[in-house]
Image (cartoon, helix red, strand yellow):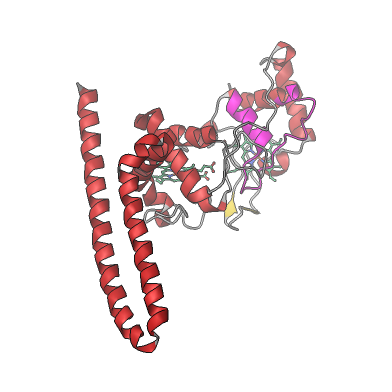
Amino acid sequence: MQKIKNVVGFTGLLAVVVLTVSFSNVQSQEMDHSKMDMSGSEMKKMDHSAMEMSTDKMQGMQDMKNMKDMKDMGDMDMKNPDAMAIMKGKMIFQMSCFLCHGNKGEGDGPAARFIGPYSHPRPNNFTMGIFKFRSTESGDLPMLKDLMRTIREGIPGYMPSFRNMGEEGIKSVAMYIAKEFIQEELPTESTIKYVQHVGPYIYSPQSVERGARIYGSMQCGECHGDDGKAGRMDLRDERKIMIHPVDLTRRETFGNGISHEDIYRTIMTGLDGTPMPGYNDSFAGKEDSAWDLVHYILSLQGR
Ligand code: HEC
Ligand code: HEC
């Protein structure tokens, strides 16, 4: 019963959004037309032929836009499930995400200024194509499923979880971000080598001990402190905003998830746009021992 109510409520909300969006489109088109007419007649005096051409062209473009809007809303999309999903994703984005990420996905929505304007992290500017939470190598775009994970789980302290939107909604808004803002094909395979933690690499005091040695030899402490607690204070992110390394003893501050697999992924991929490097190459051929490091971090948290 509750579920049905939710569905009805959501559909109603969607309908309002659709109506508002199409209404404001009609309005702006009307305004555009009158503007065009005015400038058309004024400029005709100056150069008749040239103006006619360009007015025609602009009118044509306007018509195309009308057609595109109709298409977006209407029948043609029925044949193209991706376009339908992206359309739905757009509506979700304009309801749930734009406040922080901005209508153009540039991270400058009306609420963004209230989120630590001078401290890291700022809402992501999707058009820059820099993503922290990936299962791909440093410098690569994330996979669709990475975007979906972030949207599903949220980012503790900074972005709510949108789990209750359902997988379909989550996927459609991720597809919208990819199409509209990133504007590049996302990788479809993980480029990080994932090995199971088996045999001697399951959680054990020995594994934790080996992990502690790796923590030392890979100089994680340079940034995270020897005890994992003390962070370097002189680091900046890609926007030159001050950034502090995560306190590794406090899992509630982790943005990329706190499961064993999540921490493995963080270490291998690094967090692009921040000084946290990816260690995929350093572990090449000895990926098993990355689990030791994961276990050491877990042990710092009393897990
Ligand atoms: C309350 C503000 C807020 C809202 C609402 C919000 N976000 Fe975010 N989002 C953030 C912040 C802040 C970050 C950057 C966090 C970081 O870098 O640690 C972010 C980052 C992201 C990232 C990039 C993660 C990465 O890999 O770097 C994605 C994708 C994302 N948000 C999607 C969404 C979507 C989709 C919605 C709406 C369904 C949404 N966000 C709503 C604040 C918000
Ligand atoms: C050059 C500095 C630097 C080095 C070296 C470094 N880190 Fe980080 N690390 C950071 C910064 C900065 C962050 C915080 C990023 C953020 O706020 O999004 C971070 C975040 C993390 C996180 C938390 C990710 C999350 O989910 O939010 C983990 C786990 C981590 N580092 C582990 C390590 C390990 C293990 C090593 C060594 C193999 C290491 N780091 C080396 C700078 C560094």
Q: Most extreme residue toward the top, as rendered? A: 199
Q: Is residue 107 left or right of residue 292?
A: left
Q: Residue 257 in the image: x percent, y percent? A: 53, 31
Q: Residue 249 in the image: x percent, y percent? A: 59, 32
Q: Main secondary structure of the magenta part?
A: loop
Q: Residue 245 in the image: x percent, y percent? A: 61, 44
Q: Is residue 151 left or right of residue 72?
A: right
Range of magenta residues: 261-290
Residue under the point 35% across and 36% down? 78
Residue 241 picture quarter: bottom right
Residue under the point 27% across and 63% down? 28
Q: Quadrant of the C terminus?
A: top right
Q: Residue 83 in the image: x percent, y percent? A: 41, 40
Indicate whether 29 appears above or below 199.
Answer: below
- Residue 273: within the magenta? yes
Indicate whether 257 appears above or below 19.
Answer: above
Query: Is residue 22 visible to us here?
Result: yes
Quarter of image, ligand 2: top right
